[in-house]
Image (tube, rainbow, N blue to C red):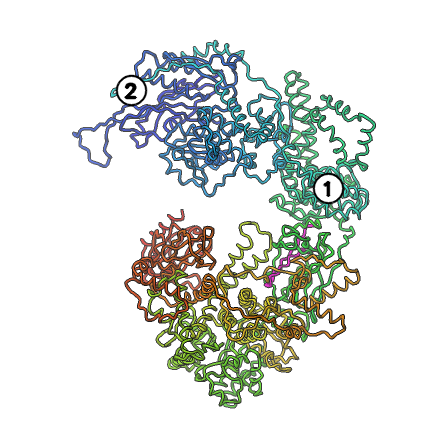
């Protein structure tokens, strides 16, 4: 029996504490005053009586009632029912002590109302009864009823006793009377306990929670509670908080919430919310501002029906299909009309259940959900002890594995929680009291099966279960009318209310004592017994949960192959076993196959030790390792547990007395380091032993089994005996299949035995009970000894000096480690004398001892092993480890003597002529990287990788050649190689396990090439570490030669071995060289060696940054130009020979001068001339010897104004338009006037120069520009060969393009409102100079009339380097992609490679339009003039001139623009050791990619094919040809490559020999790529584009540069594993020849013509040639059969007759015209935008920095997307449109649209005439348009749209700050804007600037603080105004205007980051 209440407490407002400034309550009285023995009084009760705090009020408040939950130190919950009312108190006002007081002044008093609480504390949760009792006490007090309060309180505490839940009489279960009582106030009350103590009582709390929050939020809240998250409710109602918290806890039934549970948390205890443990708490809404800073707490607003989940919290979802089934059932209960709302004939509205019934229905749904979630849990319970108390554990891994939920986060967290641990402890015993959950769990599979067959049965089942829950709370259906007196309405507001009296505690104590003495009520219920215990139903077994259909279908054949392989092994048929061994390894990926393997191996163990031969042992070990490798460290399938006894049984004999067991070869798997695995496996074996201990007492099932196994007839006996010839467990399972159904009910499990033992336990004598306890304890102890030995065997490694570290790594983290084939062994000579060193034991075995000791402590303590036995185990473990380590020494020694396994023969690679092997092949395994091709995975095809072979280093390549490890593909050869010179990164990786060979590869190298090749190899165990180090050193030595003369291109003329790395010589390194330099200078000074000031004066030039990398070598020797000039002048024909090169001959074709230097008269009559001013490379070392300049420009003028450009690379004419006669010039950027510019100016200026000479430089530069302008027909009004009408059409077409492109682009819809200067620049400029922004802005435009300087944006070399690295990682990833969202296309997009190509194409397109349409000349002045300038000029010439689209023309283009004009190939490609630090910069590759993009858009316009571009992309970095070596023409002239001299001096840095640094060499010119291409082009059409159609006349290409029109080059992602890269044609030819010879020897493999082609292995181009190639091959074959001489392919091709076609005239449709016109204007748009962006300045430039305001728009006419140029039309292809400027685009294109909104909406509305003008221009694009310069811009309208500056920004704070730079530490003033919306701190040049110069992401900011004593501060700054901002990347330093400004910035920034 229980007391109704334990304590009665009166709590009031503490006025004494109020005077001290604090408001709190105090306990006035408590009854009884002495604590109960079984229930001590809870301290701090006053805090829970007023959770929001004790405070006075000015008005009376209504009485309130709520219940707080208190938890004692033992975790028991006590319920505190509080009734609060207010009493009048008088408050006396007082003055502070510091004020003057007047003694005669009256004292002011005021009436206030103080709260007072009467409370009942009880262990029972009868909330409504507590409300009635407290209400009666308050009513008697306030109504002055004739009852003593002492009597009422005494009766509640001592006289009323109620039975606990579940102890009801049979009459009550049938609906008998409730417990009725009265507390003595004329009341009649009834109390009804619940039927079950384990089922919570909710009333309507759950239903109210779902009404408040809804289904989705309630389910999320439930998932958070059951997965141990922190949950905090807040509401204005205390009762709602209590009900919501109780509802969530009740929904978790059958689990119990074991963490902190405070439904009403007092404000004074709010620090509890910072606890790291989970909790469920509730606070009043008045405190919600104080809980907003909680980071990991889920906050639920009950009043607002919302939930807040922090970003750092992830709530796992309920697994499917349980979640869907639960949601459907809840919807059917709470919103039944939703399921029938779509019916054609609406059924009558469903009858809504009452709130109590609805509450039980919701609980029934969750009860069913737990029954389904825990299905099969009882079969995963492990019985450890039965007596004296049952101890049961749960095998979590087994449960998750059979449920296929190992990766399910929700179920894993539930099983790991404390609630489930309590669940197992309480519900695990098989003999106990059962409740509703046990019944639902046992029958739920059948219930679910019925519902699947009939969905209409689910509501019935839920209703029946809800009825059971309702009866549990309301077992008595008879109504009882209670009588509870209540106060009159408004009684609390009476004026004169008496205070609550002081209770007589003596009277109450007497009543309590009297009530306790009476035993009448207790005796009445003494006969009532609790529900009897019974055997708990087992429910479904875990093995019946998984679906077995796929197992039978997929694994039948695999199991048969597995059984045959095992039989072959034990029958010693090794060859037969090896044939099917790969199939068995693949089959072991299935868990069924792994378990079957353990059963098959166990069948072949006849005794405790199975001795095997060496080959048998190796195969068995490989099978075990494969099974363990495919399983996880959790061992959810029980594979490792099944392998444990096998590993200690299989063994082999190494020599006399030394035996090696199988466990020695499987010990390195992570599962052995998992402590949970050892515990679970130990408990499983203990359960088996406990079952066998008691099984003989229940032998009835054994006789039944024998009877059922007896054959019924001879026929049946024959069938059983012949079911399997070779005995095996699989056969026994098949044999017993028919009797399994009958045997299953008779099998007695361990839990059933335990249930029976628990039932008879009370009837046993003490001796029998003690005997059983001792037997069980001995069983556990023996198993602990056994497992301690097993753990020592599997944890101590073979090589204790090396292997122990791997074992410890496994213990620290569960990652895969090295698997050693031969490991620990066991010897028969264990008892022999040992020389064991104790110190060695302490160092090696201590880790193993600690691991085993932890295991012993845990399992023995939980299993009830005695302390003596545990102590004995701890004493035994070190000795076992010591003896085992001693035994390993001999085993390790003998295992090394085993004969090695025969491995495949190493295949030698095919070599080029002159190529030699530097290092013989090392046996390696080619490992798969991130590419799926060739792995046989999702891409299909054979598994070519991993492959076994060898890796070689030759003088040219790194080559791997081998065969696949997969036996199905082992007949093929795999080759992966790349030139050594292309190696960009070599990386050593961690050890990796290769399952194909069952070996751990310790040394793994990853070699990455800039040709998009990746070789990832793991060295075989036979390759020692010293060989690996030698390989790496030699690789770096060959990769980084001292000079280009040490590369493979010159291997035929020097030693093939690589030259050792040497230190570079300094200036005048030798005495002889120093003497020569000194004598030469002395001779010049003496006048012996005279020379002119311009030609023979000595100049010293050193190439720019990096200075040490200016040439192929590492030296920075000074070059004397006089020596080069003397050499060229020694033979007058040298210049003529040089002029015969293709690049120079092209000048004459373009009309840029005559190469005939003898005919000077003709030269002067021409407009341009070929100047030899740089013949000695004295003007610019990186320029060609011959350049084209205007006839009027003298050589002296060139020498002067060349200084105004970087590297003296002055503007040179590169190309001339044949029709418009416009010129294309190239140069480097102008010298800036900054600090570096000053250095360069002083460096390049002679010693005696004056300011006048510098001024003359500017004058000469202006003259040169005037000459270029004069040579442009547009400037002189000349049209060239055009007529006036045609010229007007040409110029007008660009103007029309201005209007149309601007309108379609949306940047400027009305060009008449653009600044007139802009429009004049677009029309009247004869020369456009495209330069850098920082240089162009310093140029005085007035000095250069008719010239327009346009600043452009381009990608610098550093950006190209970074982009190329990302592109290589995307195309050739080193490993599988971990994040599926970051796939291949996403990585390519993040590399920004395609936008860089787009930028080059757009700039080149602008050049094309200016030259071709407008007739203006263009000058490219970017960077140093040898990277981006070369790209733009080359691409523009290809688009403009069809000649460059031929093979000869492309060669001339490369020779002139890239080689002659000095692209730094050696520096950019890192060809020598001196250039390695600069990093690989694929500038030329980027150019080839652009050409490839143009080639793909115009496939008929190029004579060469795409393979030609791939060939150049491969060999420009391969160092096979000299063509792309050295940095300029001067260095190639020094090397003797240009004049084909046979014996000449060459001055190449780093060359050895020669006194002056010159080396007299034999022919060292090396081969050129053009000779190679020409030779093979004559032989075969390998470089020919058969679709090429030569055009006569002008054919200008205008490719589309949008990202959507660009594609990824197949060169980046394709490879050929059959022969390696196909660009070394000799190697491919030899490989094909060897393959054909082998086919002749072996015979044809296939009789038909069908071939299987693998894209990554075969060359599709060769296997499936195009029609033209195949036809020519067929002709050659027929000529050979007819014995005709073979005819060259070119003669055949030229002899073909072109098909005669008639020209048909057709009229184009309107849509076709519009489409073609749109295509033409696309190219113009980017040109106009580039020009306007560069021309506009000030306010007008801001229009290009504004974001668009897009809205959805339905297009009714064909409209094109202004971003991707695809169609926008119709209901399907809808788009969005800017409301300000009319920009149209797709929704997917919107993020990539530039922020260049013009915002001319107001102008558009006020100027309708402009619209009509623009529309007319659009409708008639071919009509000549007036000059744009005649349109006057409206300044007033212009100011309207330009006043808005950065209106889209959110500015939290802004102002000027001084910012210190990162590089030079200089201070510069910037305008900073703090944006709290975007979480950024941006800076601009000024307040008017609209372009953001940079930003700091505030999410990366860790600290902002003031800083003092800053070094190098500007003058007149406040020392207190400096502050630092620390981010994850760097430290920023700022300076404010003053200290106040700096402090304000710090506060604003801290407010944003906190």
Residue that badge 1 annotates? 557
Q: Are marks 2 and 1 in contact (CB under 8 Å)?
A: no
Report x, y in % for residue 220: 48, 36
Q: Is residue 1012 magenta?
A: yes
Q: Is residue 1050 visible?
A: no
Q: Is residue 1200 visible?
A: yes
The image quadrant that residue 635 belongs to is top right
Report x, y in % for residue 904: 75, 56
Report x, y in % for residue 557: 73, 42
Q: Is residue 971 above or below residue 452?
A: below
Q: Is residue 812 above or below residue 218?
A: below
In the image, which disc is placed on residue 1582? none
Neighbor class of circle 2 (other Cα within 10 Å; few <14, some 14-19, many 20+) is few
Neighbor class of circle 1 (other Cα within 10 Å; few <14, some 14-19, many 20+) is few
Left/right of residue 511 with respect to residue 660 in the rendered view: left
The image quadrant that residue 95 belongs to is top left
Q: Residue at x 48, y 72 (%)?
A: 1425
Q: Nearer the viewer, mark 2 or mark 1?
A: 1
Left/right of residue 1574 with respect to residue 1230 in the rendered view: right
Report x, y in % for residue 1096: 50, 86
Q: Which residues are magenta?
A: 999-1020
Q: Secondary structure at mark 2?
A: helix
Q: Secondary structure at mark 1?
A: helix
Q: CA–CA distance between discs 2 and 1? A: 87 Å
Provide the major secondary structure of the magenta segment: strand
Of 1716 and 203, the residue lying toward us: 1716
Of 1250 and 843, the residue lying toward us: 1250
Of 1904 and 291, the residue lying toward us: 291
Residue that badge 2 annotates? 491
Q: Is residue 1693 magenta?
A: no
Left/right of residue 1742 with respect to residue 914 in the rendered view: left
């Amino acid at each position: 029996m229980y007391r109704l209440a334990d304590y009665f407490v009166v709590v009031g407002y503490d006025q004494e504490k109020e005077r001290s400034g604090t408001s709190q309550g105090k306990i006035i009285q408590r009854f009884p005053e002495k604590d109960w023995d079984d229930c001590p009084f809870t301290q701090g009760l006053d805090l829970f009586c007023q959770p929001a705090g004790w405070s006075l009020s000015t008005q009376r408040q209504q009485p309130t009632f709520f219940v707080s939950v208190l938890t004692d130190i033992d975790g028991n919950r006590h319920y505190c029912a509080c009734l609060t009312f207010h009493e009048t108190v008088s408050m006396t006002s007082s003055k502070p002590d510091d004020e003057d007081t007047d003694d005669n002044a009256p004292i002011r008093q005021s009436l206030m109302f103080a709260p007072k609480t009467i409370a009942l504390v009880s262990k029972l949760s009868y909330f409504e009864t507590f409300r009635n009792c407290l209400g009666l006490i308050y009513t008697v007090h306030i109504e002055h009823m004739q009852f003593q309060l002492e009597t009422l309180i005494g009766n509640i505490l001592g006289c009323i006793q109620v039975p606990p839940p579940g102890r009801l009489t049979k009459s009550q279960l049938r609906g008998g009377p409730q417990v009725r009582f009265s507390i003595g106030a004329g009341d009649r009350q009834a109390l009804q306990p619940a039927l079950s103590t384990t089922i919570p009582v909710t009333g309507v709390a759950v239903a109210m929670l779902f009404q408040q929050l809804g289904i989705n939020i309630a389910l999320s809240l439930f998932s958070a509670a059951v997965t141990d998250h922190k949950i905090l409710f807040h509401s204005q109602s205390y009762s709602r908080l209590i009900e919501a918290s109780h509802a969530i806890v009740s929904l978790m039934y059958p689990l119990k919430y074991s963490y902190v549970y405070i439904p009403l948390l007092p404000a004074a205890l709010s620090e509890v919310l910072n606890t790291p443990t989970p909790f469920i708490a509730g606070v009043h809404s008045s405190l919600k501002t104080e809980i907003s800073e909680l980071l990991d707490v889920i906050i639920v607003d009950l009043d607002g029906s919302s939930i807040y989940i922090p970003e750092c919290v992830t709530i796992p979802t309920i697994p499917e299909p349980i979640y869907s089934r639960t949601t459907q059932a809840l919807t059917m209960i709470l919103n039944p009309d939703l399921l029938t709302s779509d019916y054609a004939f609406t059924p009558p509205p469903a009858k809504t259940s009452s709130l109590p019934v609805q509450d039980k229905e919701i609980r029934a749904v969750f009860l069913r959900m737990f029954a389904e979630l825990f299905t099969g849990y009882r079969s995963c319970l492990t019985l450890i002890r039965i007596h004296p108390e049952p101890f049961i554990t749960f095998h979590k891994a087994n449960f998750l594995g059979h449920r296929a939920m190992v990766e399910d986060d929700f179920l894993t967290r539930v099983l790991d929680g404390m609630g489930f641990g309590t669940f197992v402890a309480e519900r695990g015993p098989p003999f106990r009291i059962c409740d509703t959950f046990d019944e639902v769990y046992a029958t739920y599979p059948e219930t679910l099966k019925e519902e699947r067959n009939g969905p209409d049965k689910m509501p019935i089942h839920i209703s029946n279960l809800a009825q059971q829950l309702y009866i549990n709370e309301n077992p008595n259906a008879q109504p009882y009318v209670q009588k509870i007196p209540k106060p009159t309405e408004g009684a609390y507001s009476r004026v004169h209310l008496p205070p609550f009296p002081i209770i007589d505690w003596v009277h109450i104590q007497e009543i309590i004592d009297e009530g306790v003495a009476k035993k009448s009520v207790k005796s009445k219920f003494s006969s009532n017994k609790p529900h009897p215990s019974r055997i708990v139903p087992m429910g479904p077994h875990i093995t019946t949960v998984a679906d077995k259909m796929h197992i039978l279908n997929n694994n039948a054949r695999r199991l048969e192959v597995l059984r045959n392989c095992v039989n072959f092994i034990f029958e010693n048929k090794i060859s037969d076993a090896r044939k099917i061994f790969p199939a068995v390894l693949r089959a072991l990926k299935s868990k069924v196959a792994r378990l079957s393997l353990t059963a098959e191996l166990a069948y072949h163990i006849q005794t405790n030790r199975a001795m095997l031969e060496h080959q048998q042992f190796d195969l068995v070990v490989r099978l075990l390792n494969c099974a363990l490798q495919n399983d996880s460290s959790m061992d959810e399938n029980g594979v490792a547990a099944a392998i444990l006894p096998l590993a200690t049984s299989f063994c082999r004999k190494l020599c006399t007395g030394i035996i090696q067991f199988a466990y020695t070869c499987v010990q390195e798997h992570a599962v052995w380091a998992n402590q949970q695995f050892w515990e679970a496996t130990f408990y499983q074996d203990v359960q088996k032993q406990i079952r066998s201990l008691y099984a003989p007492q229940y032998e009835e099932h054994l006789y039944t089994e024998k009877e059922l196994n007896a054959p019924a007839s001879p026929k049946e006996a024959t069938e059983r005996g012949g079911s399997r010839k070779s005995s095996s467990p699989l056969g026994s399972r098949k044999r017993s299949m028919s009797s399994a159904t009958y045997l299953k009910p008779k099998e007695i499990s361990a839990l059933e035995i335990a249930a029976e033992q628990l039932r008879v336990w009370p009837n046993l004598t003490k001796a029998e009970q003690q005997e059983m306890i001792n037997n069980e304890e001995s069983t556990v102890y023996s198993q602990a000894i056994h497992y301690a030995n097993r753990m020592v065997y599997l944890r101590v490694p073979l090589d204790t000096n090396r292997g122990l570290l791997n074992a410890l790594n496994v213990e620290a983290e569960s990652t895969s480690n090295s698997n050693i084939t031969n490991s620990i062994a066991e010897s028969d000579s264990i008892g022999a004398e040992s020389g064991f060193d104790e110190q060695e034991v302490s160092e090696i075995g201590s880790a193993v001892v600690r691991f085993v000791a932890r295991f012993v402590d845990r399992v023995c303590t939980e299993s009830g092993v005695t302390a003596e036995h545990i102590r004995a185990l701890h004493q035994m473990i070190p000795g076992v480890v010591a003896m085992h380590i001693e035994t390993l020494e001999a085993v390790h020694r003998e295992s090394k003597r085993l004969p090695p396994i025969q491995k495949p023969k190493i295949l030698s690679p095919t070599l080029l002529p002159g190529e030699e092997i530097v290092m013989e092949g090392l046996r390696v395994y080619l490992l798969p990287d991130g590419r799926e091709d060739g792995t046989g995975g999702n891409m299909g095809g054979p598994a070519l990788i991993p492959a076994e072979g060898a890796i070689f280093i030759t003088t040219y390549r790194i080559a791997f050649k081998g065969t696949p490890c997969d036996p199905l593909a082992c007949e093929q050869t795999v080759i992966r190689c790349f030139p050594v010179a292309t190696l960009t990164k070599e990386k050593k990786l961690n050890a990796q396990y290769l399952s194909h060979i069952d070996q751990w590869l310790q040394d793994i190298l990853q070699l990455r090439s800039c040709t998009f090749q990746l070789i990832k190899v793991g060295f075989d165990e036979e390759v020692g570490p010293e060989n690996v180090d030698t390989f790496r050193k030699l690789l770096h030595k060959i990769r980084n030669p001292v000079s280009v003369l040490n590369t493979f291109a010159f291997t035929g003329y020097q030693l093939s071995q690589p030259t050792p790395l040497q230190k570079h010589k300094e200036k005048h390194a030798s005495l002889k060289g120093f003497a020569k330099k000194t004598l030469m200078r002395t001779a010049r000074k003496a006048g012996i060696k005279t020379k002119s000031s311009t030609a023979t004066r000595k100049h010293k030039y050193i190439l720019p940054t990096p200075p040490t990398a200016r040439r192929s070598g590492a030296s920075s020797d000074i070059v004397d130009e006089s020596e080069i000039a003397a050499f060229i002048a020694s033979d007058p024909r040298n210049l003529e020979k040089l002029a015969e090169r293709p690049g120079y001959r092209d000048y004459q074709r373009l009309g840029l001068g005559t190469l005939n230097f003898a005919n000077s008269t003709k030269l002067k009559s021409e407009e341009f001339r070929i100047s030899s001013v740089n013949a000695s490379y004295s003007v610019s070392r990186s320029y060609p010897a011959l350049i084209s300049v205007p006839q009027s420009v003298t050589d002296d003028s060139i020498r002067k104004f060349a200084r105004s450009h970087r590297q003296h690379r002055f503007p040179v004419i590169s190309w001339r338009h044949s029709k418009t006669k416009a010129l294309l010039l190239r140069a480097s950027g102008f010298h800036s006037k900054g600090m570096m510019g000053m250095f360069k100016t002083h460096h390049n200026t002679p010693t005696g120069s004056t300011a006048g000479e510098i001024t003359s430089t500017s004058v000469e530069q202006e003259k040169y520009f005037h000459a270029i302008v004069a040579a442009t027909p547009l400037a002189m009004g000349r049209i060239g060969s055009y007529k006036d009408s045609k010229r007007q059409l040409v110029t007008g077409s660009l103007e029309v393009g201005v209007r149309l492109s601007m309108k379609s682009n949306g940047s400027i819809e009305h060009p008449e409102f653009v600044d007139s200067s802009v429009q004049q620049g677009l029309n009247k400029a004869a020369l456009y100079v495209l330069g850098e922004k920082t240089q162009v802005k310093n140029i005085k435009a007035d000095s250069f009339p008719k010239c327009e300087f346009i600043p452009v944006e381009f990608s610098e070399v550093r950006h190209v380097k970074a982009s190329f690295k990302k592109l290589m990682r995307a195309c050739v990833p080193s490993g599988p992609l971990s994040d599926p969202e970051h796939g291949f296309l996403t990585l390519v997009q993040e590399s920004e490679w395609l936008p860089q190509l787009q930028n080059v194409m757009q700039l080149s397109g602008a050049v094309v339009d200016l030259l071709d349409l407008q007739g203006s000349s263009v000058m490219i002045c970017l960077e140093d003039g040898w990277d981006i300038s070369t790209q733009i000029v080359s691409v523009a010439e290809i688009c403009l001139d069809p000649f460059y689209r031929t093979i000869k023309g492309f060669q001339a283009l490369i020779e002139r623009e890239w080689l002659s004009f000095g692209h730094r190939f050696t520096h950019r490609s890192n060809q020598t050791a001196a250039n390695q630090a600069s990093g690989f910069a694929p500038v030329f590759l980027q150019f080839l990619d652009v050409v490839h993009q143009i080639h793909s858009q115009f496939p008929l316009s190029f004579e060469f094919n795409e393979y030609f571009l791939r060939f150049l992309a491969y060999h420009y970095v391969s160092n096979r040809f000299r063509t792309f070596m050295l940095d300029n023409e001067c260095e190639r002239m020094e090397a003797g490559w240009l004049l084909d001299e046979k014996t000449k001096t060459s001055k190449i840095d780093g060359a050895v020999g020669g006194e002056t640094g010159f080396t007299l060499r034999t022919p060292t010119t090396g081969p050129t790529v053009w000779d190679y291409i020409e030779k093979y082009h004559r032989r075969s059409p390998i470089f020919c584009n058969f679709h090429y159609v030569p055009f006569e006349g002008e054919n200008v290409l205008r490719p589309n540069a949008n990202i959507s029109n660009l594609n990824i080059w197949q060169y980046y992602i394709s490879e050929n594993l059959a022969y390696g890269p196909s660009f070394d044609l000799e190697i491919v030819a030899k490989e094909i020849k060897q393959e054909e010879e082998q086919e002749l020897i072996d015979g044809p493999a296939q009789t038909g013509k069908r071939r299987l082609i693998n894209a990554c292995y075969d060359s599709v181009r060769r296997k499936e040639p195009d029609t033209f190639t195949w036809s020519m091959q067929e002709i050659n074959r027929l000529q050979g059969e007819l014995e005709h001489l073979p005819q060259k392919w070119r003669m055949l091709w030229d002899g073909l007759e072109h098909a005669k076609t008639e020209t048909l005239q057709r009229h184009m449709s309107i849509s076709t015209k519009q489409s073609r016109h749109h295509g033409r204007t696309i190219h113009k748009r980017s040109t106009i935008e580039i020009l306007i962006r560069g021309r506009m300045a000030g306010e007008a430039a801001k229009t290009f920095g504004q974001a668009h305001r897009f809205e959805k728009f339905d297009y009714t006419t064909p409209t094109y997307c202004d971003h991707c140029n695809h169609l926008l039309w119709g209901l399907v292809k809808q788009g969005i449109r800017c409301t300000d400027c009319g920009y149209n685009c797709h929704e997917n294109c919107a993020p990539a649209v530039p922020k260049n909104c013009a915002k001319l909406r107001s102008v558009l509305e006020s100027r309708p005439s402009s619209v009509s003008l623009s529309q007319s221009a659009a409708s008639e694009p071919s009509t000549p348009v007036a000059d744009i310069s005649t349109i006057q811009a409206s300044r007033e309208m212009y100011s309207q749209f330009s006043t808005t500056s950065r209106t889209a920004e959110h500015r939290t704070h802004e102002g000027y700050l001084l910012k210190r730079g990162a590089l030079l530490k200089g201070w510069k003033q910037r305008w900073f804007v703090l944006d709290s919306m975007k979480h950024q701190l941006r800076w601009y040049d000024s307040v008017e600037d609209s372009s953001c110069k940079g930003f700091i992401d505030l999410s990366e900011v860790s600290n902002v603080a003031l800083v003092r004593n800053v070094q190098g501060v500007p003058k007149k700054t406040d020392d207190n105004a400096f502050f630092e901002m620390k981010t994850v990347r760097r430290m920023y330093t700022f300076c404010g205007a003053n200290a106040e400004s700096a402090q304000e910035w710090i506060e604003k920034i801290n407010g944003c980051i906190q």
